[in-house]
Image (spheres, grey):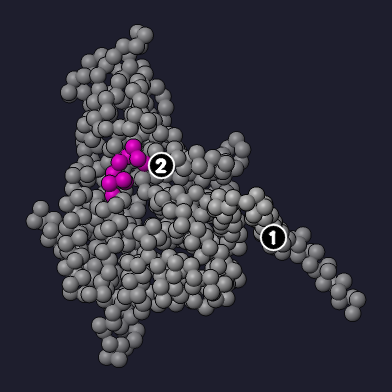
Amino acid sequence: MARRVLKFASLAAATTGIYVYGNKFLDPNDFGVVRVGRAIATVHLRSAERLRELCCANRGTFIKVGQHLGALDYLLPEEYTRTLKVLHSQAPQSTRQEIEQVIREDLGKEPEHVGGEPVLKVEKKQAVSQCTLDCRTLPLQRLSHCSGSSNAGPIKELFASFEDTPLGAASLAQVHKAVLQDGRTVAVKVQHPKVQAQSSKDILLMEVLLLVVKQIFPDFEFMWLVEEAKKNLPLELDFLNEGRNAEKVAHMLKDFDFLKVPRIYWELSTRRVLLMEFMEGGQVNDRAYMKRNGINVNEISRNLGKLYSEMIFVNGFVHCDPHPGNVLVKKCPASGKAHIILLDHGLYQVLSESFRMDYCCLWQALIKADMKRVQKYSQRLGAGDLYPLFACMLTARSWESVNRGIDQAPVSASEDVEIRSNAAAYLPQITQLLNNVPRQMLLLLKTNDLLRGIESALHTRASASSFLNMSRCCIRAVSTYQKSKSRSLYRRAQISLTEALSLWQINLYEVFLWLKGSRLGNWVIGLLSRMHHSTH
């Protein structure tokens, strides 16, 4: 325990380097500007690498915090985010023996005979909601009749084959490919041992040491990280909760035929072991994979935007961990359609109705560049006088672009540099803002950043289609809310008509953009232009 405290004290010391980022302790007048820039970048990189190593050494909760920091592109120096992003897919792995021990502890076994066929009865050692899981049995053709022996390996009894090398290792668990005795190929998600027991101690240490840092640097306002960890970590550690989330989102978005969510095998799932349908594909940010497999990059970006707009604005139930390892793409050989596979359903944010409506109205105002409404709804969401900064954080655009209209021009390299540079200058205000906004907003900001990173990798960021899809969802959500609050049939009809007209305008504008970008559209525009010149 003492060693862990010392490790985390080092982690806290490394984190204070982030604070130096926003508080210019070095005076550029004393050195050459280039030398200062290089020195600061070197310090950031060294601190980030130490932070990553310490997260890996402490594992569990610390890797989760490192992953969260790696998603704060709008807040931290590039050296930190680039270094910590590897924790999304390259976290430390548990050994085969450790994985087998977790499966043995969670899946108690006793052989039974049903109709003369040997089956494996799975005894749940963790409490399971009866509405989610009933008592079921799984036929196993090759189960040994002496499987009750304590020396029998649970992996050999449960699976015909089990790959030792995990498909991926994350902060709390790792996933292995396996084949059940009945021939079904499955993905087996197994929690790292001791994560549950250690997580509460880790959070307590984190809270104490961040309070110490805050005493030294009063403007250091990162306590919201601890608050979020306290709330979300127990949910993420419960794999049955993850299974329920997966089924809920699959049902909620069943109309999107391009979305695939792995089926959960409840009969072999516990709070620490989750068996699901095996699905494979390329990561959503892998342009080379999409090119090799004939997958349209713009279509994938557009469909991903549709999914998240529907989750955020219409349903208020949001998958909050869409890093590339959790979002796969694959072309269906039969239909030729590209599918999006959504994995890892442990972290969801449920949005209250009032928050969702304010957020819808804010995005409508941002898309229309209506600054009065941007101010109004930003302040309703807790931004106060920092609403210009809040608008820039949400859109990852400069204030100039927000005023001009975020759909008017794509993001330039110089604008990206400007945003990152301003993050250093406004770090105290950003941390103040993160403390003031509703807790629901924190995971949405993280989700926005992860989605923006995917769009950047696909070169589809700030495309017109993404804003059109957001507009559609906002209009539908606000109209549904208004109709639910109105008792007048006339008023409801009026709202429905306004909704239909607004959606029709968006569809018409989308057709115009398509014609403008197509060969046919260019030919028609050229023809009209020549006809116009010939008449003069």
The reply to whether the magenta stretch includes residue 398 is: no
Q: Residue at x 59, y 50 (%)?
A: 487
Picture layout, residue 149 above or below residue 530: above
Mark 2, residue position: 245
The reply to whether the magenta stretch includes residue 238 is: yes
Judged left or right of residue 22, residue 281 is: right
Q: In what element is the residue under mark 1?
A: helix
User: Would you say the residues marked 2 and 1 are in contact, meaning their CB atoms lie under 8 Å apart?
Assistant: no
Mark 1, residue position: 505
Taking the view exactly as shown, the residue that stands out farthest to the right is 535
Q: CA distance from mark 2 to mark 1?
A: 35 Å
- The x and y percentages for residue 35 are 31, 83
Picture layout, residue 514 above or below residue 39: above
Taking the view exactly as shown, the residue that stands out farthest to the bottom is 29
Q: Quadrant of the C terminus?
A: bottom right
Q: In what element is the residue under mark 2?
A: helix
Taking the view exactly as shown, the residue that stands out farthest to the front is 488
Q: Nearer the viewer, residue 471 or 80?
A: 471
Give the magenta-colored segment's residue range: 233-242
Q: Nearer the viewer, residue 373 or 330?
A: 373
Q: Quadrant of residue 206?
A: bottom left
Tell me which secondary structure the magenta stretch mostly adopts.
helix
